[in-house]
Image (spheres, rainbow, N blue to C red):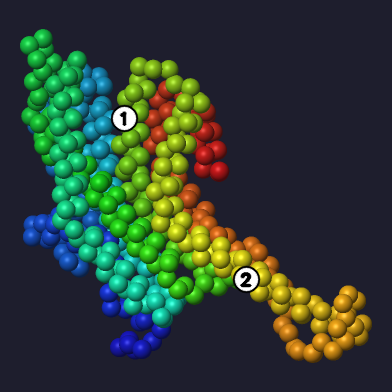
Amino acid sequence: MTDTHSPSTHAVTPPHGADFLASHGGPFFQLQVRLKLLKENSLRAPPRAALFIALAWGVPFLLGVPRSFSLDHGEGAYLADLSVWSKFFIGIGAFVLAEQQVEKGLRAKLQQLFFAPIVAPSSMARAAALVSTALRRRDLWPAELACLILAVFASFLSYSNFHAAEASSWAVEHSLDGNRISAAGWWSICFSLPLFVFLFTRGIWRHLVWAQMLRGISKLELRLVANHPDGKAGLGFLARYPNTYVLFVLGMSCAIAAQIAKHFINQDVSTATLTTIMAGWLVIVLAFFAYPLSAFTQPLTRLKENGLIVLGAHATRYLRASERKAIGRNIFADPGTEPEVEIADPSKLYDASSKLSSMLISRSAVIPVAAAALIPFAVAGATKLPYKEVFSVLKKLLLL
């Protein structure tokens, strides 16, 4: 049996009220529990992703048979519609699969905050209260209702666009007497698109809950170490949390890139235009994750400033003592009676403090997230530009 008092056990058991399960809770989660799509102790993400893709992408395909197999409508054919693939297949699948990855990653990062321990013992109760507040916000039914309202609004816009379409497609039959929405089109309006928008906005909301919790923790008493080998005072692990959102970012990016690709079809596209679009989207994605992490800039900056002051003074005393041992006196402003105290050499500590980063930026997190954000846009750009030019843009943005 495992010793309940061993360090390994403590490393995986958070204090009361400090366990954050990002993908649990809320009306939609409880509905899935009742439908036996998941369990309280298992998100069953892969089977749910397959089911949701089958309902959102597969049902419209079947409703359109045999025309679903046809490419007669060109860009209006079901299998040629980039929006269908990006939203109903890749997007929904990525959002559902991301739930398990996000929950596991965020939970591990929070536990390390408590067990390193970064949070000082005097602030443990307040930190646990912040987590409890975050869990209540996560479960708010008005928040999921707002997500549902946005999903319904998106469906209304889709309905309006179908009626305004000037050509027939898998979703609509165009005629002079007015457009007629097909069964596949109605399903996408009533189920597929609302599901995509709901999962997307729900994921954004839950990240904002996590962000506010982190910003609250940043204001507590933290046990930061200026000379920590991670160069971020012991918070380097937290800077890597965006890695858990790679699939979520991929789903967002595919949906937006598909719309841009459709816009590119009948237009000339320059490398400068593509670069601007990709750089703008990258800034938005990075800002999404920088918001919670930026709250730690103030304590890190304060630690660096105070550390350099204290260690600088300590280094002065150490070096003056070394000077006296070497030549019997201090060359400049020799006090004559300065007490001899054994002082450790603070040079390495001072160097480490001077290199301390006040920004929680991790290249190991930025690169995967940036790649997930940019690759769909690069694929969209490659439909109009030489792939070498597109690859060059992608490479430059990833290396920034």
> Quick one: 320 or 193, which is closer to the camera?
320
- Please give left or right for residue 327 compared with residue 312 in the image: right
Task: Determine the CA span between mark 1 and mark 2.
Answer: 50 Å
Q: Which numbered disc covers residue 109? A: none
Q: Residue at x 43, y 47 (%)?
A: 287
> Quick one: 320 or 66, which is closer to the camera?
320
Q: Amino acid at mark 1?
A: Gln
Residue 60 to residue 143: above or below: above
> Quick one: 234 or 311, which is closer to the camera?
311
Q: Quadrant of the C terminus?
A: top right
Q: Secondary structure at mark 1?
A: helix
Q: Which numbered disc covers residue 259? A: 1
Which residue extends farthest top?
176
Residue 270 to residue 397: above or below: above
Residue 67: percent from left, percent from top: 13, 24
* Res. 372 image quadrant: top left
Q: Amino acid at mark 2?
A: Gly
- Please give left or right for residue 197 compared with residue 211 in the image: left
Residue 238 to residue 83: above or below: below
Residue 177: percent from left, percent from top: 7, 11
Q: Residue at x 18, y 58 (%)?
A: 140
Q: Quadrant of the N terminus?
A: bottom left
* Res. 36 image quadrant: bottom left
Q: Residue at x 34, y 74 (%)?
A: 126
The residue that mark 2 highlights is 307
